[in-house]
Image (cartoon, grey):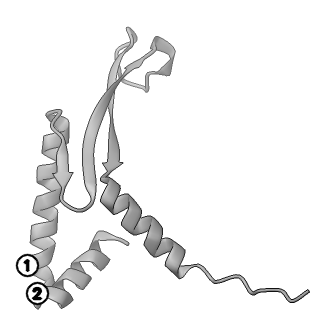
Amino acid sequence: MTHVEVCKEVAKKCKLSEEEVRAVVESFVNITNQALIEGDEVKIKGLGTLYSKAYHVAKRDLEFGQSSEGGERRRIRFRPFESANTRITDGWKALQPVPKKRSV
């Protein structure tokens, strides 16, 4: 789902305008990004935790324009809550077709 699709669904379910929802979603994304940049974790109730993790980068792995001395990069990671993981797995299983029984 794209953020536009999410905004449309939320607007429909909450009876709000898409512009209002879009402003809220964009604010949420901006606040989340800033928290991750600062090294904070972002816990989303019922879903999981977003966090950034530092990695050492070897001299040869650096991209153009970065120091040739090596350094550190941060990557975003997601750790689902167990309840969300179970809900999503069970929901996915419910959508799978039931295999037909074969008669012997």
**How far is disc 2 from disc 1 in space, using C-alphas?**
5 Å
What residue lies at 65% left-to-right and 83% top-to-bottom?
Answer: 98
Q: What's the mark number on residue 17? A: 2
Residue found farthest to the top: 69
Q: Amino acid at mark 2?
A: Ser
Q: Residues within 10 Å of mark 1 (few under 14, many from 20)?
A: few
Q: Which mark is residue 5?
A: none
- Quadrant of the image occupied by residue 4: bottom left
Residue 58, compared with residue 28, is above or below; it is: above
Q: Residue at x 33, y 61 (%)?
A: 84
- At 18% from the left and 37% from the top, the residue drawn is 37
Residue 8 image-quadrant placement? bottom left
Label 1 sits on a secondary structure element that is helix
- The residue pinned by badge 1 equals 20
Mark 1 and mark 2 in contact (Cβ < 8 Å)? Answer: yes
Q: Residue furthest front?
A: 104
Instruction: Estimate the x, y position of residue 88 in percent, counting from the top left.
Output: 41, 67
